[in-house]
Image (spheres, rainbow, N blue to C red):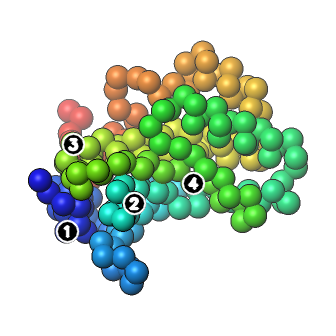
Amino acid sequence: MRYITLQLIMEYLERFGWKNYEAVNEPSEQEGIIYTGWRASENSPVYMLSIDPMIEKKCISFRTQSLLQAPYRDIPKDCLLDLLLVLHWINFRIIVGKFSYEPVRGEVRFSIDLPIDENTLSYAQFVHSLGLIVEIVETYVPLIKKIKEGELTAEKFIQHDLRGEVLLEKQNLSQSLKDLLKGLGRISWN
């Protein structure tokens, strides 16, 4: 049995080839937190991620930070309703993980929270969670931004999703995850 510590998470990140991260001790907690991020390509946005083992809550949380800012007072009501509907729709479809919305600051984030009742996390679980975070964020955030800007409606988004145009339930890794792994030198596409 391997207990979840910052050291274990750092070992998993290094083993995966993820070199840019910062491990930070939290004053009120024994296990600390890791801050990192990724960029699928030079033209892609940078997404920030925290990996937080919360032993007292018996879970580990993979959380993105500030994917989008959409304070409810600053965007048209129809865009806000579309945004909320799409976030709920995506949460319904993806099963693992969730998008959340904090209305005052307008922060949209995505997280995967795994129970760790036995205080363990395998490398396979870690890689699976990291891959899901990247794939879901890279797939959906650009579309969510279009909804916030009024360039896409919830109705059109859901219709496209039902036709499989935004489908996450596919066998192959998304191109963004492939690009990320290639950038990390983890795989070759010869």
Instruction: Read off the residue under disc 4.
Output: 109
Marks 1 and 4 sit apart, C-alpha to C-alpha, by 26 Å
Q: Residue 22 carries which label?
A: none
Question: Do the CB atoms of the residues marked 1 and 2 lie less than 8 Å apart?
Answer: no
User: Mark 3 Cα within 10 Å, few/some/many (few <14, many 20+)?
Assistant: few
Q: Where is residue 87 in the image (x, y as percent from the top left)?
A: 65, 40
Mark 4 burial class by Cα count in 10 Å: few <14, some 14-19, many 20+: many
Q: Distance between the residues labelled 1 and 2?
A: 19 Å
Instruction: Label 4: state its secondary structure.
Output: strand
* Mark 1: amino acid: Gln
Quickly name the residue at label 3: 124
- Specify the amino acid type for callout 4: Arg
In x, y percent, where is residue 100?
A: 61, 50
Residue at the far top in the pictured view: 163
Q: Is residue 80 above or below residue 85?
A: below
> Which element is circle 3 on?
helix
Which label's residue is closer to the chain start, 1 or 3?
A: 1
- Decide: is 37 above or below 147: below
Disc 2 on helix, strand or loop?
A: helix
Q: Which of marks 1 and 2 is nearer the N terminus?
A: 1
Question: Is there a contact, CB below 8 Å, between mark 4 and mark 2?
Answer: no
Please identify the quarter of the rendering in which residue 27 is found: bottom left
Say whether disc 3 or disc 2 marks the residue closer to the N-terminus: 2
Between discs 1 and 4, the one toward the N terminus: 1
Q: Which residue is drawn at 40% across and 34% down?
A: 174
